[in-house]
Amino acid sequence: MPDIIQLLPDNIANQIAAGEVIQRPASAVKELLENAVDAGATEIQLLIQDAGKALVQVIDNGKGMSENDARMAFERHATSKIRKVEDLFHIQTMGFRGEALASIAAVAQVSMKTKRAEDAMGTYIEIENSTLQRLEPCAAPQGTSISMKHLFFNVPARRNFLKSNTTELRNIIDEFIRVAMPFPSIKFSLSHNGQEMFHLETGSLKQRLVQLLGHNYNAKLVPVQEETDYLTIHGFIGKPDAARKTRGEQYFFVNKRFIKSNYLHHAVMTAFDNLLAKDSYPAYCLFIDLDPAQVDVNVHPTKQEIKFEDERIIYAFVHAAVKHALAQFSIAPSLDFTLNAEIQQLEAVSQPFTSDKKEAASGSSMYQHFTEKNRAHFIEPSVSNKELKSWKSFFEAAPNKEEAPAQFEFEQKAKSPKWILQPGSPLLQSLNTYIIALTNNGFILVHQQLAHERILYERYVQLAHKHQAPTQKSLFPVQMELPPTDAALLVELLPELTLIGFQIEPFGGNSFVIQGTPADVPTGNEKHSIELLLEQFKHFKSDTTFSKREQVIRCMARQQAVKAGQSLSQKEMLTLIEELLNCDTANLTPSGNPTFISFNEAYIDGLFGR
């Protein structure tokens, strides 16, 4: 029988590799921007058309390439950064594998102009489906301009998996921010369909963060700065009042490379213990600089997941740095011994530090660990184990809220309940959260916020199906400015928001005008309502179970529901229960939490052993 194993053709092998590296337009944006940074550029432009599906173009004023280098750059695993195996453990640049340009050229039509300062002419090159089409000299300024057109033109199945333009644009903005944030000395710009979305001038790190995240962060950032002989941690954390319900503004960079790390995120969260509301996440942008030999970035195609030589050390330093910053700026409690007169009388304070005492102190193991060069990072096993042993519990799954306690009986259809309210009986509100109502067979305990969430959910569902939701017109339209990522998200959600009663119009750039809102939104709360809706939607967006409309409706119901802790009158409590009983599914919220618990006579007797 003939042999059946054959080498794949280059174009097919490149397409397979591209599946790992180039998954969407944002993947190409990341690779091209990082190449521009590695080229030593001081100014980088990103031009996008149709959310990157039609064009992704990056223009830089870096060092450029020779004709031979320009042609070789599109070969698989061709790189200027690796010469021997040891180089993999001393990587200082963003890209190094030599996969990016070859992968892009396998699934798009690519053209490039490039020129070095010492060359009289530049080089123009065209590649399509991994095949060289043109290579010729051209006039060009110093640097490189590379264009990727018609992504996945030769792989229609993969092109069909791309999301809407607004979704793909948000992914591009995310990658743009991750590259631009750690390089405030480089000027960046981003334009989409001819409209400039970002124009980032050079400046300090804080100025760059405010440019990217929004001006409201200007007064909400706390600096972090810690240096040791092992690593340096610097950056900013958000004050507790800037915390959000989603993990959006959270960035870790290791040697200026963006990474994702739940482990280090836990270190930050524990440093914020007792300073944040439940289910809130702080903003942070932290840069960890250490010897590249202590880090392995070659563990994931996108290089966003890396491996440290000793994660416990990094964890301990991140936790301590954030804790220190919070205490230093009087955000977290800290000890101030100068305020206590009794402490001033202690022997350690009042008596001089003699030479004998100095020798005794310097001979201790703790002193040795923190003063000897290259010893500051060694943590005693007993201490580190004690401090870190419980971090995994942070990620353990919470109990399934959809499972109702077995001892309670829920009504499956409230329109025909097994019980009825006792007419004329007063309603009792407990803890400003629970409503107790007497029935013909016991009583029910209603959670006012969850019950109202169910009511509003069914109301918004009906409005969305009618396509003519009533709108409360604003006497004075409200103008709002959003960060670019939120602005792109709002544009994506405008059709769904219109269905439930919002009237919002783009006003140029990242500005919008709110002309009207649903009747449930209080006057004067329009802007906050939309900002909160966007935050809640981002919390939902990773769940592909629900449609975009369903997610918007759930977010609105949760947002506008009466909150736990709010006092209600007898009339308000009665109205809420009556509306709940008229719901199609009265006993559960859209997410599966119970809205009420029914205590019948038999169950109550059982509690007392009767």
Image (tube, grey):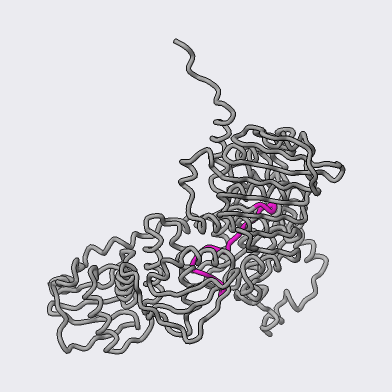
Instruction: Answer above or below: position of 321 versus 562.
Output: above
Q: 338 or 122, which lies in front? A: 122
Q: Residue at x 80, y 74 (%)?
A: 352
Q: In the image, 575: left or right of 249?
A: left
Q: Which residue is drawn at 61% across and 62% down?
A: 319
Q: Is 55 included in the stretch rendered in magenta?
A: no
Residue 598's spot in the image, x, y percent? 20, 73
What segment carries the magenta color?
A: 240-257
Q: Which residue is drawn at 68% across and 80% down?
A: 343
Q: Is 245 included in the stretch rendered in magenta?
A: yes
Residue 457's spot in the image, x, y percent? 32, 70
Q: In which quarter of the image is the N terminus?
A: top left
Work out whether residue 148 can be spotted: yes
Q: 188 or 207, which lies in front? A: 188
Q: Residue furthest top?
A: 1
Work out whether residue 564 can be spotted: no
- The answer to which quarter of the image holds residue 119 is top right
Instruction: Answer above or below: position of 389 versus 3.
Output: below
Q: 22 or 465, which lies in front? A: 465
Residue 219's spot in the image, x, y percent? 65, 76
Q: In the image, 556: left or right of 89?
A: left
